[in-house]
Image: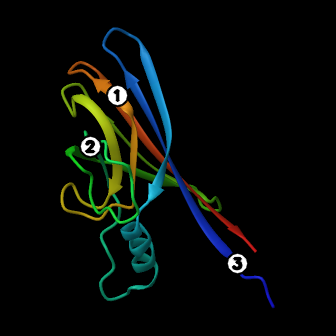
Amino acid sequence: MKKSDTFNIVGCLTAELFKSDGTYEVTHKHNAILNIGFDFIADSIGNSSSRPAPMGYIALGTGTTAVTGTQTELVSQLMAKAATYAHDAGTKVFTFETTFNKGEATGALTEASVQNAETGGTLIDRVVFPVINKGAEDTLKMTFTFTMSQSS
């Protein structure tokens, strides 16, 4: 019996909070790919008649409900912002990154995702993290890194 190839994708979030008083905080947390995220990947590869819109937003929220694969949205989305996608050919890593500037997405942030619309889109992932208290004068850089791997 031939061993089959397996494909894996792992995501993680790095959140960098630049406080108005000059201090800096970083949060690093692995995230979960949701069932609809796997559907998105499959449809992006093979559905030629109705391919989904590309991922292009990072959303933040205040929900604290544990992540489950069946979720389809953030529990309590506060704001989504356009993200920059990056991938170097020949590598197995791609990223989405954006910065929430002063006055954007302020409050006690506890969840985030990468999604393909500002509201009502498809999420590829969701992550819940310890509270990040973003004040009105703070900036928050969010970077989602996805690493693909294959083994046989």
| Mark 1 nearby-residue class (10 Å; few <14, some 14–19, many ≥20) | many
Residue 8 located left or right of residue 115: right
The kind of residue on which mark 1 rests is Ile
At 34% from the left and 45% from the top, the residue drawn is 112
CB contact under 8 Å: marks 1 and 3: no
* Earlier residue among tags 2 and 1: 2
Task: Specify the farthest residue to the top.
Answer: 21
- Residue marked by disc 3: 5
Q: Spatial distance from mark 2 to mark 3, Cα to Cα? A: 37 Å
Between residues 25 and 108, which one lies in front from this camera angle? 108
Q: Position of residue 65 (x, y in %)?
A: 31, 47
Quarter occupied by the N terminus: bottom right
Display coloring: rainbow
> In the picture provided, is 96 more to the left or to the right than 5?
left
Q: Nearer the viewer, mark 2 or mark 3?
A: 2
Disc 1 from disc 3: Cα separation: 39 Å
Q: Quadrant of residue 34?
A: bottom left
The residue beneath circle 2 is 63
Q: Residue at x 44, y 21 (%)?
A: 25
Report which residue position mark 1 lands on.
Answer: 132
Q: Residue at x 26, y 58 (%)?
A: 73
x and y, in percent, of residue 108 in the image: 26, 29
